[in-house]
Amino acid sequence: MILVTGSKGQLGTELCHLLDERQEDYVAVDVAEMDILDAAKVDAVFEQVKPSLVYHCAAYTAVDAAEDEGKELNYAINVTGTENVAKACAKFNATLVYISTDYVFDGEKPIGQEWLETDQPDPQTEYGRTKRLGEEAVEKYLDNYYIIRTAWVFGHYGKNFVFTMQHLAEKHPKLTVVNDQHGRPTWTRTLAEFMTYLTEHGKDYGYYHLSNDATEDTTWYDFAVEILKDTDVEVVPVDSSQFPAKAKRPLNSTMSLAKAKATGFLIPTWQEALAAFYRQEVKK
């Protein structure tokens, strides 16, 4: 049996829709059904479901809030919660798929170079620190795990950069977007498909990086231009000093896709993914 945590979040919802399409049997839980901070509750759900595979999508992702008012909750969910899930997986010999982030790195690698799965983590934010501690917890308690780091996530079922740009464009004829932070967007559908691909094809356990592909270097400005290309809104590039934030933003979030591609998984470009996202959004 498959267990999906964080089933009402942006990625969890996408994953559940994918499993529904494939007519897979699974149990979806969010905080109401299984509070991952309650180890006894986690064990009770595992005892009932007896999962052989767990997709752990539950996470705290408010990067700026994690620096102050959300600091304790950020740690509780991303570290303690992940430890509870990892321990339960070990007890029931379930394979765990844990979703992590490029924020585990310092973001300072020279532009044009990509982050490898083997690069040394050095998180610069509370969010990145707790996600790294979550990775370490998975490694500590399990051998049968997949840790997938991703970045710049967008999808149909939550707040994200695409919807933000669309909403701003409805109110403003001109938008300024940072042009000195580099990376690749990731559609939740592509990420969900990769998660299931690894488990269904029995790929080697360990770390993987996954975003949508790109033919050239990409910034948030480039992403915004593509999002709004069919509108009359002017998109103006600025540097990140124009948008000060509590949490330090990586200047380079671009992760190598070589290991993911070597599994045989076909990764669409982010432009292709965005176009497919728009087509699905119209159908909704």
Image (cartoon, rainbow, N blue to C red):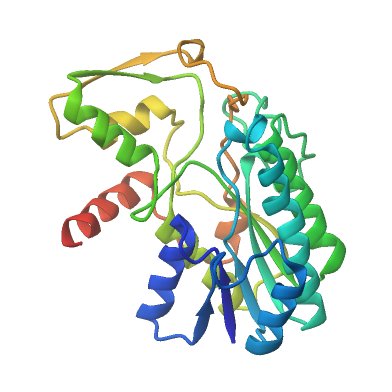
Residue 262 lies, with reference to residue 71, above or below; the image says below
- Residue 254's x, y, as percent? 56, 37
Return the residue nearer the eye: 115 or 30: 30
Q: Quadrant of residue 39?
A: bottom right
Q: Residue at x 35, y 79 (%)?
A: 21
- Residue 150's x, y, as percent? 56, 48
- Residue 145's x, y, as percent? 73, 68
The image quadrant where one finds the C terminus is bottom left
Q: Quadrant of residue 105?
A: top right
The image quadrant where one finds the N terminus is bottom right
- Residue 147's x, y, as percent? 68, 59
Q: Quadrant of residue 249?
A: top right
Q: Is residue 144 left or right of residue 173?
A: right
Return the residue nearer the eye: 148 or 170: 170
Q: Residue furthest right?
A: 140
Q: Residue at x 60, y 48 (%)?
A: 60
Q: Residue at x 33, y 35 (%)?
A: 164
Residue 115 lies, with reference to residue 225, above or below; the image says below
Residue 75 lies, with reference to residue 53, above or below; the image says above
Q: Residue at x 39, y 48 (%)?
A: 269
Return the residue nearer the eye: 14 or 48: 48
Q: Is residue 135 left or right of residue 270?
A: right
> Is residue 267 something one can see in this rendering?
no
Q: How many marks do you count on the picture?
A: 0
> Is residue 266 something one can see in this rendering?
yes
